[in-house]
Structures are given as C-alpha cells and as structure tokens.
C-alpha cells in the first residue's frame, strides 16, 4: 500500500488559485471548506480534505503529478509501494521479498517471538509464498499462520501456490541448528493490492 497526501493548492494548479486574495493576488489563508468528494476504485465516495494523508492502493497515483497535469493534480505521493494499479482486480498483484533476521541470516537461539524473525501479513494475506533455506548444513523451524510448524531442511525450499493456503503470518526459529547460524533464508511472496475505498 502507498501513502498519499491531499494537496488542493499545488503551485501552478487551477485549484491552487481558489484561495487567492483578489485584492493582492497572493495566496490567502486556506479555507476550512477545502474538501472534495472523489470516487475511489470500488465506486465508494471518499471525502478528501486538504492536507490529510491516507493509505490505499496505487489507484490514487493517477491524480498526482506527473501522472496527470499539474493544473489537475490534487494528490501527492508520499510513499510508493511500486505496484501498478489495474481496473482488473486479479492484475493488482504485488510481489515482495523478506529477509528475516539480519539480511537473511538466522542467528542461533533466536525464536519466533523476535520481531525481526516474524512477518505479519494479516492486512494483505499472501496468495503465493516461497520460503528458501540456502544454508548447506543447517535446518530451521518455520511457523505459518501462528499455528502450523514445520522444519525447513538445509538447502531446500517450501512453496505455497495460490489456492494451497492463504498465509497471514510467517515466523522463524533457529533453535534446531544448535549453536550455528542459518545462512541464508529468504521469503518471496505475492499479495493482491486491495483498495480501501
């Protein structure tokens, strides 16, 4: 999900001229009535107030400069997840990579409860997951959805394809390797970017 800021008074925009003091030609103090109603991707009306920020999918990038001309822009992209928005929901798939621990290295004695060893996907469940352990000697434990635990053997991978399992969390435990680090573990997953309006 990306983060956006509502800016109804961008420099050079026609909307920016709405609060110009006609006696001086300079920007006036902004009116408290600076809000607009915009239809979101799910055809739900969203009230956007100047200066507010919100998080949603990249449907809203079409209203930001340079995707639209500056005189029509009323959105500023403050963080971009890099996804591409499509009007076909199944095409709004985002691929991501996660390296647990320190850059994919699982330190000995670290467990599921360590924050850098767990990934919460409850807000955007993964449809596809590939978990790889490229360490040639040491296995690790993996917990899926808070309950299912399995051993990911050395130099192996586990794949959950679309339709197999909806993954809402992944966590690692390195207690099975004894006193050794597990080098290198990575998770590749995809999820569908869903609009909130």
Image: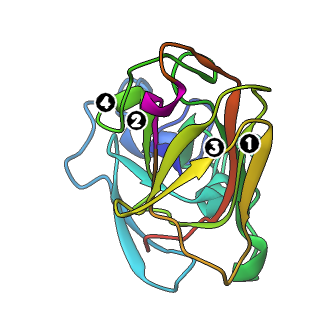
* Residue found at x 34% / y 30%: 115
Residue 8 percent coordinates (x, y):
45, 46
What residue did someone put label 3 on?
A: 81
Closer to us: mark 1 or mark 2? 1
Does 135 appear in magenta? no
Colour pattern: rainbow
Say which of marks 4 and 1 sits in front: 1
Q: Which is more N-terminal, label 1 or label 4?
A: 4
Q: Which residues are magenta?
A: 172-177
Which residue does the image show at 50% across and 43% down from the upper left?
141
Determine whether the residue tagged by mark 2 lies in a helix, strand or loop: loop
| Residue picked out by circle 1 | 132
Camera-side mark, 3 or 4: 3
The reply to whether callout 4 and callout 1 are in contact (CB within 8 Å) is no
What number is the disc on residue 28? 4
Asked whether disc 3 touches disc 1, contact meaning CB atoms under 8 Å apart, the reply is no
Q: Secondary structure at mark 1?
A: strand
- Do callouts 2 and 4 mark residues in contact (Cβ within 8 Å)? yes
| Number of residue marks | 4
Task: Say left or right for 117 vs 129.
Answer: left
User: SS class of the residue under badge 4?
Assistant: loop
User: Which sits earlier in the primary sequence, circle 3 or circle 1?
Assistant: 3
Q: Are marks 3 and 4 in contact (CB under 8 Å)?
A: no
Mark 3 neighbour class, 10 Å CA radius: few under 14, some 14 to 19, many 20 or more: few
Q: Position of 190 compared to 122: left or right?
A: right
- Mark 2 = which residue? 20
Q: Nearer the viewer, residue 35 or 183?
A: 183
Local SS, label 3: loop
Residue 11 higher or lower than 188, as above or below:
above
Task: Identify the residue shown where x is 56% and y is 37%.
Answer: 140
Q: CA distance from mark 2 to mark 4?
A: 5 Å
Q: Is residue 48 above or below residue 131?
A: below
């Amino acid at each position: 999900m990306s983060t956006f800021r509502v800016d109804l008074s961008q420099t050079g925009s026609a909307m920016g001229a709405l609060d110009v003091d006609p006696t001086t030609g300079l920007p006036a103090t902004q009116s408290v009535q600076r809000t607009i109603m915009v239809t979101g991707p799910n055809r739900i009306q969203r009230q956007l107030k100047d200066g507010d920020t919100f998080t949603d999918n990249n449907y809203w990038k079409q209203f930001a400069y340079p995707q639209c001309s500056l005189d029509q822009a009323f959105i500023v992209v403050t963080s971009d997840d890099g996804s591409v928005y499509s009007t076909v929901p199944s095409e709004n798939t985002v691929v991501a990579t996660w390296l647990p621990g320190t850059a994919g290295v699982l330190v000995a004695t670290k467990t599921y409860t360590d924050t850098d060893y767990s990934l919460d996907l409850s807000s955007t469940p993964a449809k596809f997951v590939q978990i790889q352990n490229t360490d040639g000697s040491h296995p690790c434990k993996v917990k899926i959805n808070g309950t299912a635990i399995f051993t990911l053997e050395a130099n192996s991978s586990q794949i959950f394809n679309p339709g197999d399992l909806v993954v809402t969390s992944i966590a690692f435990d390195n207690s099975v390797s004894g006193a050794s680090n597990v080098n290198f573990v990575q998770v590749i997953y995809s999820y569908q970017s869903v609009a909130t309006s």
